[in-house]
Image (spheres, rainbow, N blue to C red):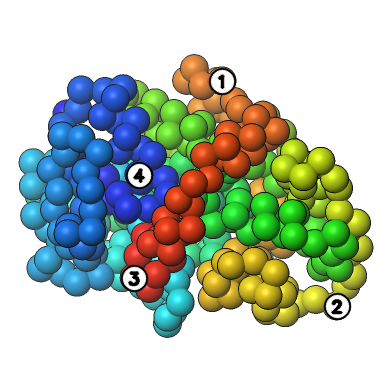
């Protein structure tokens, strides 16, 4: 099978390409914005292009059977939702033109009955745009992904380990079902091999349902052996929270703001059909955190690469 991975320089894309090369025999093509800055991990075809610019990326879709769409436009400049919308529309049109059979998209958890944050609402819009073409779309919805290189986890880790006392917004009590990067990759590969998952939307998560407070406390204890004092207050807006995160962590406030905006939405799995369909052993939160912090070397450079304007982000 000929498979395209977009967003190959991003956190999930890098891991997925590595796993595909070692665990499958598919022919892999990757789409990157700057081929000179990308070091292929193995025998892959590298195509340079930008989905925001029609006429420059379409060659990556030639002879492709299945495409992973892992592009998200949260970065430092402009309207990320508009860029997400434009990129998805361009990609769907190009995939339609060459007869791509299937698109696999990594989206975000969150109930459509809630008022979704701009971050999660944009993910939903991309789902709809990709589904307008002839290709069957498989959607995987995940919450916070735990792994070395994840902007969300980096924010949690640095907050947990840098402050002995935290005054936090009420979102600290919001429930979340984090998932290890290894499990995200495993589910992504599993749906590729199962044609019956085409056209379906699945929710994926780890075995632990935790509040953000519990994630901060557990992360701090795992890394430092101590638990910070966390005091929720009702006065911190998402924007103020983003500035606060920007002061305490090295996650840019422009990226922190949409991430913080999303934590007001409960993000838990309510539909476990995929977990019952495929054989993926879910990784406990504690194990995922220990794996992430044990492979931290080089994270700063990778985070900078995926959060630079126009780059692929988590």
Whether residue 72 is visible here, answered yes or no, is: no
Q: Position of residue 61 (x, y in %)?
A: 14, 49
Q: Nearer the viewer, mark 4 or mark 1?
A: 4
Mark nearer the N terminus (4 vs 1): 4
Query: Cβ–Cβ below 8 Å for labels 2 and 3?
Result: no
Residue identifier under label 1? 281
In the picture as drawn, the residue positioned furthest to the bottom comes out as 78
Q: Are marks 3 and 1 in contact (CB under 8 Å)?
A: no
> Distance between the Cα atoms at labels 2 and 3?
33 Å
Q: Residue at x 41, y 45 (%)?
A: 12
Q: What residue is drawn where x is 26% and y is 29%?
A: 21
Q: Which mark is residue 314?
A: none
Q: Nearer the viewer, residue 198 or 81?
A: 81
The disc at residue 14 is 4
Cα separation between marks 3 and 4: 17 Å
At label 2, counting other C-alpha atoms closer than 10 Å, the crowd grade (few under 14, some 14-19, many 20 or more) is few
Q: Give how far apart the Cα atoms at labels 2 and 4 are.
A: 39 Å
Secondary structure state at the residue bearing disc 2? loop
Give the structural element (helix, strand or loop) at label 3: loop
- Badge 1 marks a residue whose secondary structure is loop
């Amino acid at each position: 099978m000929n498979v395209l991975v977009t967003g190959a320089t991003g956190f999930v894309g890098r891991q997925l390409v590595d796993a595909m090369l070692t665990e499958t025999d598919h022919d892999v093509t990757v789409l990157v914005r700057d081929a000179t800055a990308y070091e292929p991990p193995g025998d892959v075809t590298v195509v340079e292009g930008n989905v925001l610019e029609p006429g420059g990326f379409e060659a990556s879709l030639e002879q492709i059977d299945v495409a992973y769409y892992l592009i998200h436009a949260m970065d430092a400049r402009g309207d990320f939702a508009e860029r997400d919308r434009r990129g998805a529309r361009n990609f769907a049109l190009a995939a339609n033109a060459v007869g791509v059979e299937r698109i696999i998209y990594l989206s975000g958890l969150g109930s459509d009955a809630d008022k979704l944050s701009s971050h999660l609402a944009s993910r939903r819009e991309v789902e709809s745009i990709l589904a307008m073409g002839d290709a069957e779309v498989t959607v995987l919805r995940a919450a916070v992904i735990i792994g070395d290189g994840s902007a969300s986890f980096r924010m949690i880790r640095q907050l947990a380990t840098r402050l002995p006392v935290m005054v936090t917004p009420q979102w600290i009590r919001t429930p979340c079902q984090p998932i290890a990067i290894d499990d995200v990759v495993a589910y992504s590969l599993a749906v590729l091999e199962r044609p019956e998952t085409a056209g379906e939307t699945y929710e994926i998560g780890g075995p632990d349902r935790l509040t953000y407070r519990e994630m901060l406390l557990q992360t701090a204890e795992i890394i430092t052996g101590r638990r910070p004092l966390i005091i929720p207050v009702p006065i911190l807006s998402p924007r103020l929270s983003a500035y606060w995160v920007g002061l305490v962590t090295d996650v840019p406030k422009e990226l922190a703001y949409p991430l913080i905006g999303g934590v007001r939405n409960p993000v838990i799995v309510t539909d476990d059909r995929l977990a019952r369909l495929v054989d993926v052993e879910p990784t406990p939160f504690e194990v995922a955190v220990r794996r992430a912090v044990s492979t931290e070397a080089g994270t700063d450079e990778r985070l900078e690469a995926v959060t630079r304007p126009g780059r692929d982000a988590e």
